[in-house]
Image (spheres, grey):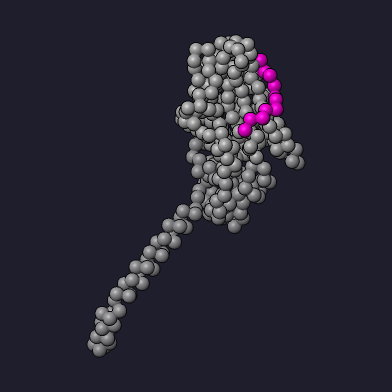
C-alpha cells in the first residue's frame, strides 16, 4: 500500500503541470458552455407576442407566446429571432418585442414593424427658410422625434436617419432602410414656394407604385386631417424615396415661407396631430396589405 502511494506521488509530481492545464481547460470549457447556453435563453416579458412561420410581419402566424415562457434562441436575423419553445416547436418572433419589458395595450402588426424615419436636412443643410429665418431642419427633427415616440408606444422598431442636428448625405439615406431591412421609410419635410406667402398645404409623395409606397402614402394621407389644405397624394422624384427598395414616402407638412403655415409648423399641437395620425395610417396600410395578400 505504501509503495502504491509512493508511485502515485511520483506520478503526480511528474505530470502535475499537464494535469493542471487539463483541469483548467475543462473548467473553462464548462463555464463557457454554461454562459453561452444562458445567453441563448430568453423569457417572454409581455403577453400575446405572435410566433410566425418565417421572419417578418407578413409571414403567416403560427401561435401566440405567453408571458413567462422560456425560449431558446436558435438564430438572429434582421431584428427577428428564431426560437424553440419548451414543447420543441419553433418559429420566428420580433426580437425587440422579446426584450421589451414595458407592457403594450395590444400587440398588432405595427408592433412587429421596422420603420425608418428621416428628418429632412440637418447640419450644414438647413433646408427651407421661414420669413423670419427659421430653418426647416429644426422642425423636421422635432416632428420625427414626436412620430418616433408615438410609434414606439405601439411596440414598433424605429430607426432614425439622424437624432441630432447633423447632415446625412442624400445617397446614404435610402441605405439606412435597406441595411436595417425596414418594412417602410418615411421622410419628413416642409415645403417652400418661389415667393413667400403664395402657397399653402401638405402633400404626401411616393415614387414607386408597385412596392407599397403609393398605398402607404394614400393610407397616411387619409388620416392626417390637418388644419391646412390637403393637396393629396402625388408622384415625387425625390432621391430618398426613388432609390429606396422598401415602401417609401416623403411628407411635405406645410410651407416654411408661408406665415399662415409656419404658425402651425412650429406648433407642438400641430406636430402632435401628425405624430398621432401616422401610426393609425400605418396600421391601416398593414391591414390592407394583409387582406390583399389573402
Q: Left or right: 21 with respect to 246?
A: left
Quadrant for the C terminus in the image: top right
- Residue visible at 60% across and 49% down in the picture: 92
Q: Residue at 49%, 17% (x, y): give it.
A: 134
Q: Is residue 39 magenta?
A: no
Relative to 200, residue 245 above or below: below
In x, y percent, where is residue 281? 65, 28
Residue 291: quadrant of the picture: top right
Is 16 displayed left or right of 252 in the figure? left
Where residue 292 appears, x then y in whole percent? 75, 38
Of residues 206 and 183, which is closer to you in this image? Answer: 206
Please count the marks in the image. Answer: 0
In the rendered view, tell whether residue 265 sits above or below residue 122. Answer: above
Foreground of the two, 256 or 27: 256
Instruction: State whether residue 294 is above or below residue 30.
Output: above
Q: x and y percent of residue 268 in the render?
A: 51, 18
Q: Camera-side residue: 126 or 267? A: 126
Looking at the image, which residue is at 41% across and 64% down?
30
**Which residue is farthest front?**
194
Q: Which residues are magenta?
A: 227-239
Corner quadrant of residue 217: top right
Q: Would you say residue 111 is visible in this rendering?
A: no
Task: Pinpoint residue 36: horizontal percent, then vertical percent.
Answer: 45, 57
Quadrant in which the N terminus appears: bottom left
In this view of the protein, can residue 38 be seen by the observer? Answer: yes
Observer-nearest residue: 211 or 288?
211
Q: Residue at x 69, y 21 (%)?
A: 232
Amino acid at each position: 500500500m505504501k509503495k502504491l502511494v509512493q508511485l502515485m506521488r511520483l506520478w503526480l509530481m511528474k505530470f502535475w503541470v499537464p494535469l493542471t492545464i487539463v483541469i483548467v481547460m475543462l473548467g473553462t470549457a464548462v463555464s463557457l458552455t454554461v454562459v453561452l447556453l444562458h445567453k441563448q435563453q430568453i423569457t417572454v416579458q409581455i403577453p400575446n407576442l405572435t410566433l410566425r412561420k418565417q421572419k417578418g410581419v407578413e409571414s403567416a402566424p403560427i401561435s401566440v407566446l405567453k408571458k413567462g415562457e422560456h425560449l431558446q434562441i436558435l438564430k438572429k436575423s434582421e431584428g427577428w429571432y428564431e426560437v424553440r419553445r419548451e414543447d420543441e416547436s419553433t418559429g420566428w418572433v420580433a426580437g425587440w418585442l422579446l426584450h421589451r419589458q414595458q407592457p403594450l395595450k395590444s400587440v398588432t402588426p405595427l408592433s412587429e414593424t421596422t420603420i425608418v424615419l428621416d428628418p429632412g436636412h440637418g447640419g450644414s443643410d438647413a433646408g427651407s427658410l421661414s420669413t423670419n429665418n427659421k430653418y426647416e431642419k429644426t422642425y423636421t427633427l422635432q416632428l420625427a422625434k414626436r412620430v418616433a415616440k408615438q410609434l414606439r408606444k405601439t411596440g414598433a422598431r424605429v430607426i432614425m436617419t439622424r437624432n441630432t442636428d447633423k447632415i446625412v448625405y442624400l445617397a446614404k439615406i435610402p441605405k439606412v432602410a435597406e441595411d436595417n431591412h425596414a418594412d417602410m421609410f418615411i421622410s419628413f419635410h416642409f415645403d417652400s414656394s418661389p415667393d413667400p406667402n403664395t402657397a399653402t398645404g401638405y402633400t404626401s409623395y411616393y415614387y414607386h407604385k408597385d412596392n407599397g409606397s403609393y398605398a402607404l402614402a394614400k393610407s397616411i394621407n387619409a388620416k392626417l386631417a390637418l388644419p391646412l389644405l390637403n393637396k393629396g397624394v402625388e408622384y415625387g422624384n425625390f432621391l430618398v424615396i426613388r432609390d429606396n427598395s422598401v415602401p417609401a414616402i416623403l411628407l411635405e407638412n406645410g410651407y416654411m415661407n408661408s406665415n399662415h403655415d409656419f404658425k402651425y409648423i412650429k406648433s407642438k399641437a400641430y406636430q402632435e396631430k401628425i405624430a398621432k395620425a401616422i401610426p393609425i395610417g400605418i396600421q391601416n396600410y398593414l391591414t390592407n396589405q394583409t387582406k390583399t395578400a389573402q
